[in-house]
Image (spheres, rainbow, N blue to C red):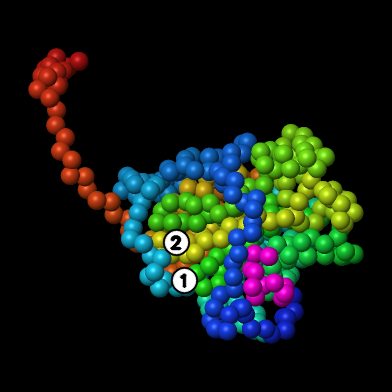
Amino acid sequence: MASGTDVSPQIPRWDIGCAPNNDSLPVMEDENGDSSENLTQSRKGKPPRNVSYMRHCSSSAFFIDSEFDVGIIGLKSPSTENSGFLPVFRSGSCSEKGPKQYMEDEYICVDNLNQHLVAVKTPAPGAFYGVFDGHGGIDAATFTRKNLLNFIVEDSQFQCGTKKAIKSAFRRIDHALADANSIDSSSGTTALAALIMGRTMVVANAGDSRAVMGKRGRAVELSKDHKPNCTSERLRIERLGGVIYDGYLNGQLSVARALGDWHIKGPKGSKSPLSAEPELEEINLTEEDEFLIIGCDGLWDVMSSQCAVTMVRKELVIHNDPERCSKALVKEALQRNSCDNLTVVVVCFSPDPPPKIEMPRSHKRRSISAEGLDRLQDILDNGV
């Protein structure tokens, strides 16, 4: 089983925020120019990512009944933008080796940043979560788990530009992997992280792990799988001289973005078709945002985003335990014959279970014509 929340030594104290008011949040500027592409990019051999019902579920307890399924897509409720909602973070995780010989996944769960980073002041509440899917050994994934959070908060731009600090931390991790003598150059990892301060959440992704929000029963994807066959990634790869063989970058790697893998990237400073640049997505949490699922591709290879959200919501209604939810997802993925390591983190934004979704009854009156009644009677009388 992968390790949990170890981090590197603490960093010097600083006061967060650019305004005189110490309660203000760091500015989350929008400078992620390449993240606007539709997150529903299709992927070969993967389940559909925007399905409003659950498919091929081997556990009958998770099938959607008609009451839950009707009206999930497009469900609306009164606006909560000015409701004063403040999230309360609870998380659970599960990480299993699965059918593979070695475990190369890592993860981190920090429900309270102020308690975890004692020397750092962040707006309360604050939290940090991440999953790291290693390849070529676990070393790169372990290094990233231990250092990514600290690299973010100690960045000089963090107080005024959280997005810039996150991108800088990803680059710093990538370069540190190149310089570390104890880490093999063929070791690499994908990285998916969610940093939350107050109501503002920034999701950063490099690789094929995925973050999915459960929003009143509806799956909302907050990251894009960086597969070599993805149109935007393929164009970038080919523009930089890379090639794709049978879905693999340069015939070696099944992802288009990763940290490490310097045997593919070549000397530092050179432009490589394998990118360490994360794509960022920023959202403001509301009362409709019930939970977040982040998982490595071992889960998403066999399960759609909507299926995972449906399972977690039903589980939370029963027992309200995110740990048991993450275990249920891993168990279901194994029953569906996932061929990879499996790591899942479920984060709840409220201490209460999700409310029951009640759809208004239809007041439309339906009738059958006289001709139709005659036809029906004829069928009954003649038994045809």
| Image quarter of the N terminus | bottom right
| Image quarter of the C terminus | top left
Instruction: Give 117 or 243, whichever is nearer the viewer.
Output: 243
Furthest toward the front, the residue is 19
Does the magenta segment cover residue 186? no
Q: Is residue 93 above or below residue 38?
A: below
Residue at left offset 73%, top offset 81%: 11
Classify mark 1: residues with Cα within 10 Å, few (<14), some (14-19) or many (20+): many
* Secondary structure of residue under mark 2: strand
Residue at left offset 90%, top offset 54%: 267
Observer able to see residue 50: yes
Q: What's the mark number on residue 289? A: 2
Q: Could you tell me residue 294's position as x and y percent?
A: 58, 57
Which residues lie in the magenta part?
154-164
Does the magenta segment cover residue 157? yes
| Tag 2 and tag 1, C-beta contact below 8 Å | yes
* Residue carrying label 1: 87
